[in-house]
């Protein structure tokens, strides 16, 4: 249903809390963007296979899965502000762990830092998303969440720029076509230097997060509405599982996160397959993030004129078509199509999130938000599966041909299928076949 009245998306009374919470969206966007290129960086520096390097994303998005429900239970018992504080502390600790990780030069230590960091992000996302939804009239809730999420790409762009100019362009290992052929002594020197380069953005990020933590501690963050009578967890879970719109929404977010991270992470491997270096490939990812930002703005505007489920349908179909073009066009045009996918990814997370939580009570929303944040695990599992596909013929990205295309091209069948299934969800909601009361 489109919004026809003059209900404000954000009222003046809660403008300051809205701004403060919205700033967190940029913070986790930065962490997402600066981490994606690290898959390729660790692969080269530590001489890993594609599937081994994908453990970066497994650690990063796996942390969301493990901590989302505990975070929701914490927020349910205490408050939004306390949840945000715990989230920022964990975020800072995880980022600062990169300092000893670089000193020890152990891949698992870096993954541990990312794992702890995303414990913090799980707290922040579990808290911030339902909080934004509750900051005003339910008629404008999805618009409000899309508006807040529009600041997420700001963090994405800044994170990518940090990765490009402070990491990718300064990696000495990337100066050699066959880094593995160097002597062990020379590799050891380069590896030490490169791991320090990878370390620095995270350590600086950890210090910035500590500054934000102080600002939040000093700010008054009132609850939007009075706390309702707490319902038992068993009753809450039972109600959520019976809510088909919510249950299929969780599955759709698993698929969305998988598609997003696959299209963003493996843009570097796709570029490698057509002889484009990682630092140049970062320019293409920057274009993807810009399109992602534009898509958020366009989507937020279009929601004034059409239902969220209908807009989701259009964007999922167009995203699928771009993935198919990415598969079967084996040159720079295919890379352009991969970049274009981000335009259609843009509105999916807040839109699916809003559809799934629509109509839930505040208390149910806190637990429901945990399930939706746990769905971010799709960003850990599906890129790992894509890495396995790319490694079918060996560690290179174009060792073999599948259906007439290289394995890196063929691997984008996975996000194409994700978009197709999201389209089925949006049709079900739009046609009224998937409702909250089935």
Image: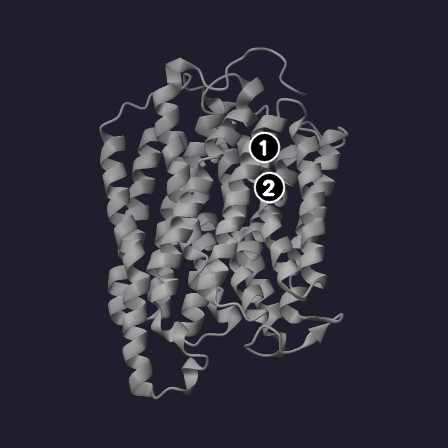
* Labelled disc at residue 18: none
Can you give x and y, in whole percent of width and height, for residue 117 in the image?
Answer: 35, 51
Label 1 belongs to which residue? 298
Nearer to me, 252 or 286 = 286
Q: Is residue 44 visible?
A: yes
- The figure's colour scheme reads one colour
Label 1 residue SS: helix
The image position of residue 16, as x and y in percent, is 34, 22
On screen, residue 202 versus residue 355, left or right, reads left
- Residue 232 makes an appearance in the image: no
Is 5 in front, or is 271? 271
For the point 71% across and 38% down, the residue is 314
* Horizontal arrangement in the rendering, residue 332 relative to residue 421 (left or right): left
**How far from the left and from the top, in percent, is residue 264?**
53, 55
Q: Residue at x 46, y 79 (%)?
A: 177
Horizontal placement of 267 versus 16: left or right? right
Name the one closer to the observer, 381 or 234: 381
Going from the N terminus, do you reach mark 1 or mark 2 first?
Answer: 2
Q: On the image, numbered disc 2 is attached to which residue?
A: 250
Comparing 285 with 127, the one in front is 285
Tell me if residue 300 comes above or below residue 331 in the rendering. above
At 71% from the left edge and 42% from the top edge, which residue is drawn? 423
**Quarter of the image where the N terminus is located:** top right
Corner quadrant of residue 15: top left
Q: Nearer the viewer, mark 1 or mark 2?
A: 1
Dot 1: within a 10 Å radius of its alpha carbon, few (fewer than 14), some, or many (20 or more) residues?
Answer: some
Q: Quadrant of the C terminus?
A: top right
Q: Residue at x 53, y 67 (%)?
A: 276
- Whole-percent x and y of residue 219? 26, 26
């Amino acid at each position: 249903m489109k919004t026809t009245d003059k209900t404000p998306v954000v009222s003046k009374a809660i403008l300051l809390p809205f701004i403060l919470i919205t700033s967190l969206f940029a913070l986790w966007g930065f962490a997402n963007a600066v981490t994606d290129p690290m898959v390729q960086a660790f692969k080269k520096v530590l001489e890993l296979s594609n599937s081994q390097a994908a453990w970066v994303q497994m650690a990063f998005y796996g942390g969301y899965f493990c901590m989302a429900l505990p975070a929701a239970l914490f927020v349910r018992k205490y408050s939004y502000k306390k949840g945000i504080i715990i989230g920022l502390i964990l975020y800072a600790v995880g980022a600062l762990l990169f300092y000893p990780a670089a000193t020890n030069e152990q891949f698992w230590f870096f993954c541990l830092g990312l794992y702890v960091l995303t414990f913090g992000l799980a707290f922040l996302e579990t808290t911030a998303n339902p909080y934004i939804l509750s900051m005003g009239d339910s008629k404008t809730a999805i618009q409000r969440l899309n508006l807040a999420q529009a600041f997420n790409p700001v963090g994405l762009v800044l994170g990518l720029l940090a990765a490009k100019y402070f990491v990718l362009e300064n990696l000495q290992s990337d100066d050699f076509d066959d880094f593995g052929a160097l002597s062990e002594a020379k590799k050891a020197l380069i590896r030490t230097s490169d791991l320090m380069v990878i370390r620095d953005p995270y350590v600086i990020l950890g210090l910035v997060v500590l500054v934000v933590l102080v600002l939040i501690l000093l700010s008054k963050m009132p609850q939007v509405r009075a706390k309702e009578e707490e319902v038992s967890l068993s009753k809450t879970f039972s109600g959520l599982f019976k809510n088909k719109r919510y249950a299929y929404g969780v599955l759709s977010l698993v698929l969305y996160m998988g598609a997003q991270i696959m299209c963003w992470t493996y843009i570097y491997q796709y570029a490698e397959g057509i002889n484009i270096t990682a630092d140049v490939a970062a320019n293409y990812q920057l274009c993807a993030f810009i399109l992602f930002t534009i898509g958020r703005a366009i989507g937020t505007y279009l929601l004034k004129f059409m239902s969220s489920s209908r807009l989701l349908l259009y964007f999922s179909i167009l995203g699928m078509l771009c993935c198919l073009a990415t598969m079967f066009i084996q040159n720079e045009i295919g890379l352009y199509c991969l970049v274009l996918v981000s335009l259609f990814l843009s509105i999916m997370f807040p839109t699916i999130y809003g559809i799934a939580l629509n109509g839930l009570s505040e208390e149910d929303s806190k637990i429901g938000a945990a399930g939706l944040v746990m769905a971010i695990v799709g960003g850990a599992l599906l890129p790992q599966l894509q890495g396995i596909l790319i490694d079918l013929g060996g560690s290179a990205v174009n060792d073999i041909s599948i259906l007439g295309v290289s394995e890196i091209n063929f691997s984008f069948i996975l996000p194409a299928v994700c978009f197709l299934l999201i389209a089925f969800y949006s049709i079900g909601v739009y046609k009224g076949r998937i409702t909250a009361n089935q």
